[in-house]
Image: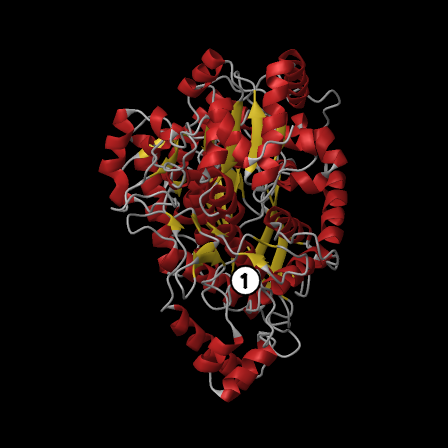
Amino acid sequence: MKLTSTLIICLLGFNLLIPHAVAEENLRQIYNDKKDSYTLSTKHVDKNGNARFVNHLIKQNSLYLLQHANNPVNWWAWAEDAFKEAARLNKPIFLSIGYSTCHWCHVMARESFDNIETANFINDNFIPIKVDREEYPDIDELYLTSVQMLSGKAGWPLTAVLTPDGKAFFGGTYFQPEALINVLSKIDQTWRERQDAVLAQAERLNTALKGINKASKAAESIDAQIILEAAKRIDTSLSQTESELSKPGFPREPEMLFLLHHGLKTQSKSAIQTVSNRLLTLAASGLHDHVGGGFHRYTVDSNWNIPHFEKMLYNQAQMGKAYIEAYALTGNQALKDTASKTFSFLLETMQSPHGGFYAAMDAESEDSDGNKTEGAYYLWSHSELTDILSKNELEIAEAVFGVSRQGNFTGSNVIKRNPDNFNEGSNSVLNRQQAVAVLDKLTAARATRKPPHTDTKIITSWNSMAISALLAGYQVTAEEEYLQAAKKAADRIWKLSYQDTGTLKRTLSEDSSSVLASLEDYAYFSNALLDAFDILGDTVWLERSKEVAKQMIEYFHDSETGGFKISSSIGAKVPILRLVTARDDATFSGNSMAAQVLVRLYHRTGKVLYKNTANQTIAAFSNQLFANPEALSGMLLAASKLNSGEVNHKQYAAKGNIAILSKANAEGGLEIKMAISDGWHVNASQVLGDYLIPTKLISTPQTNCSPLSNISYPDGNLVSLGFQEEKLLVYEGQTMLIASQVKPHKNGCRVLSAQLKIQACTDEICLAPETIPIRTSTHIHAPQDK
């Protein structure tokens, strides 16, 4: 039955202020106390500019929820009270999930949720709940999966209808106003007339969701051959020319980061080149903000022309990391320049003065007439450019940056770079200088515009990605600013999000934390703390990482499947199915990152619990890995590190008792420093018995580098050990090995490759011999023994 707006009003009575009538008295007081701290996002204001409606969301701190706190919809936050109310009134729940910088979330809010007639219908027949997906990624994942099963598609705004106990039975994404009323009226009628059938449908879906959590029946280990085959599939996928114009273009950072690691470990020139080419394409595209730096979340077309204009912290972090790692492996200056510009945007625009980084910048901004439209801050009309630029500069903008009179987006221009007329890596100084001059003028002009709204909440997992990215940037460039920003963010999260509360929190405001952390927060933060330990060498970072990982295992690990549930076992406010999923989307999943961090902790501590739990996690998703490796590239990365060790400037052996730092020296050779813990030693390169395993550095096949030669070993110390009478030659404490290249300055040499073979012992025991893969970029400039 289709209900017109007029009929809805008649059915509900002519009181259009029903939402206001249900608002509690104290909500108005909270609004009065809070109204100056956020921007109203409603057209319903009185003559004094105060909101006519106030709902339960006014109690929240989330910017997204506050954007809806003055809708005529009587929204509830995700809390037990809302579910109790639904059960008491026997009403279905209308669930809407989004985030503050989402363009289509804003559109649906203006069209439907700020419409009094629509609001009255929702209020009368449903209990409406709003969720900020950035606060509750586990709730978002549960209902995203549910809607995907129900409708075959999912996205934001996410729209779902639930039973009073939280089981979904209908779902979709954005609905136009008439379509929303039409579908909700049918749902309401069905709920009233055939509730048993609705409940049965909800139970069937819930059973299917529980099936996701079942342990793999054919769990297998992921060996090197499987990883190699998966890498080839990902390589092929990333190198394909995009052609489906209607298909959105996402950067796919997790796959690029996996392929870079794989290319480094296996010395695969193809894998590294595939990622480098893709990154260069993205740097030239409309996804990249050429004027201000940073990257938009995705483009609406697969040719990377027109973005959705929101900028997310996790995109800046992952893209910055990918660009700087690709530069370290290729020496391509264009990759380094893009990384530097991305990090500058991160530090200058998204960094909180208190430490840490803001979540996102809005897709919408005000145009010259004061109207909010998508991308207004980033778009340029040809007439504007004519006013800003000289005739010669305008010609350069047309040739290099693709601007035109007709534009490429609603009559305006998204700036992109034409690779045929400008090559970042070219020797054309004139082109470069002229193009930079044009961008400088556009930067000055943009500074007069009102920037998009920034969601200033500090999200633990996303900040952890930024910390790791900046530390990677510091490792390559020695930019002290990167290091200090990373340390400041890590310290702030540790204090406010963990130390002051005893359990990790997901979000921070100025001086407090709220919302319990999800799996991804624990995993990413533990990983970032390990990155800090590797760079700084201070064991305080390792101890913090271990403490966070301990809670991660305690609160999230599922003994039945071997994987991790994405929701914590503590603090649950309402009944919710705790999913065990590992699909990588825009970022590595919580399970993928948990497996990676456990492998890294095992290498640094030798604690078998970490290794066993990592093995269980990888095995739990082995069937999915075989079927669709592209969707679990983070789990492939964990398996690779578990099978054959990490490849980084700093590696570990002997259960973490030996740290191995490698770097290229000024002469083009390789230097390896072993820091051996007290009470441990390794056999020297010369041994006094045939049964002993000597320390040996072996050159492995190089890519564009000469083989290593003239390996210089230090003299061993002659010692007597308690378990034998014969004396031994050993290395203890700090030990340096040096190797040179046959032709040290061979053109194109980017990564020196070798294997270090050692056997570590104490006075009482000897461990099994170990082989550590050495991969050292010749483009790393940071001090590596800080």
Location of residue 457 by image quarter: top left
Residue 311 sits above or below residue 530 on the image: below
Q: How is the image coloured?
A: secondary structure
Q: Residue drawn at (55%, 60%), measured in percent from left and top?
A: 328
Residue 191: x, y in percent?
60, 18
Between 581 and 169, the one nearer to me in the picture: 169
Location of residue 146 by image quarter: top right
Residue 43 visible at all: yes
Between 250 and 590, the one nearer to me in the picture: 250
Q: Residues within 10 Å of mark 1 (few under 14, many from 20)?
A: many
Residue 293: x, y in percent?
47, 63
Q: Quadrant of the N terminus?
A: top right
Residue 92: x, y in percent?
54, 20
Q: Secondary structure at mark 1?
A: loop
Between 433 and 274, the one nearer to me in the picture: 433
Residue 407: x, y in percent?
59, 71
Residue 236 sits above or below residue 464 on the image: below
Give the total number of marks visible in the rendering. Answer: 1
Which residue in the structure is indicated by mark 1? 288
Q: Residue drawn at (51%, 13%), measured in percent from left and top?
A: 90
Residue 446 sits above or below residue 123 on the image: below
Q: Residue furthest bottom?
A: 392
Residue 567 visible at all: no
Location of residue 507 by image quarter: top left
Q: Amino acid at mark 1?
A: His
Q: Residue drawn at (53%, 59%), measured in percent from left and top?
A: 324
